[in-house]
Image (cartoon, helix red, strand yellow):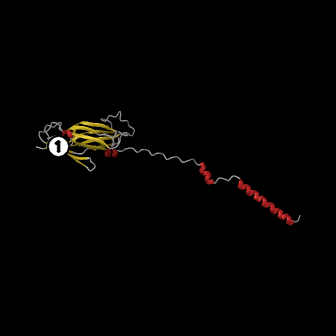
Amino acid sequence: MNIRTLFWLCCLSLSVTAALIALSACSGPKPEPPMAAESAAKPAPEAPAKPAEPGLNVGDVEAGVVVSATVPPEEVSAQVSVDNMETARKRLSMATVTVKPPYPAKLTVRVTLSPQVSFEKEPVVVRGKLRRDEQPIEPEFSTIVTKGGPVGDSSIKYDFDVMQGLAAPPDTMLVYARFDVYLMPKGTPPTGLDPKTVQSDRHTELISNPVRINFVK
């Protein structure tokens, strides 16, 4: 065999070997891309935790409990007339009462607490008195507010006699209700709370609209 023939045989052998190697590479398992392998190794992301429900504060109580005061309809007579002034939101802003002789021995001013939001999870304790020309009138009023909102009648009413303790009616008097208000911690059960004594660090005041009572001669 001459050198030329040997050279061609070597070249042919190399070509066959290269073809076999290429065929083996194509038929074997393909390696997984690095990024795909990394993604498969990572656990599925967890769903975001539900944010905690925010609690109430004293500002919510001040805006969420409307306190109004006026002479109730059953007290209106030929001697007693009432002019109630309301805001654009239908809230009582002022009540003017005119009383003619013979003056009644008793004259009721009704104070109404109207909760606008629910206080079931954080009860509210309301405690205070009606004031006549800045002097408190007995008895003290105290209650626990839990429910509220537009569904159902959740209003709380209390009547005060503005004539008690008077030897004679004055020409005029100004009365209004002023209450200390305590917002209880979240989750406090209302049962067991004594509204006459219980207190809280979250404290504010609620004041009703004024009621001007004029006794005409």
Residue, far right: 1
Determine whether the residue tagged by mark 1 lies in a helix, strand or loop: strand
Q: Is residue 135 left or right of residue 191?
A: left
- Residue at the (30%, 37%) spot, across then down: 143
- Residue at the (17%, 43%) spot, across then down: 81
Is residue 167 placed above or below 49 in the rendered structure?
A: above
**In this figure, which residue is indicated by the disc labeled 1?**
81
- Residue at the (29%, 42%) spot, across then down: 114
Q: Is residue 41 left or right of residue 10?
A: left
Residue 27: horizontal and vertical position, in percent? 71, 54
Residue 207: horizontal and vertical position, in percent? 26, 44
Mark 1 Cα within 10 Å, few/some/many (few <14, many 20+)? some
Residue 141: horizontal and vertical position, in percent? 26, 37
Residue, far bottom: 4
Q: Observer-nearest residue: 63 or 29?
A: 29
Quadrant (top left/top right/bottom left/bottom right) for the N terminus: bottom right
Q: Identify which amino acid the numbered label 1 is placed on.
A: Ser
Residue 14: horizontal and vertical position, in percent? 79, 61
Occupied quadrant, residue 76: top left
Q: Is residue 192 left or right of residue 40?
A: left
Occupied quadrant, residue 151: top left
Residue, far left: 217
Quadrant (top left/top right/bottom left/bottom right) for the C terminus: top left
- Give the tally of numbered discs: 1
Occupied quadrant, residue 8: bottom right
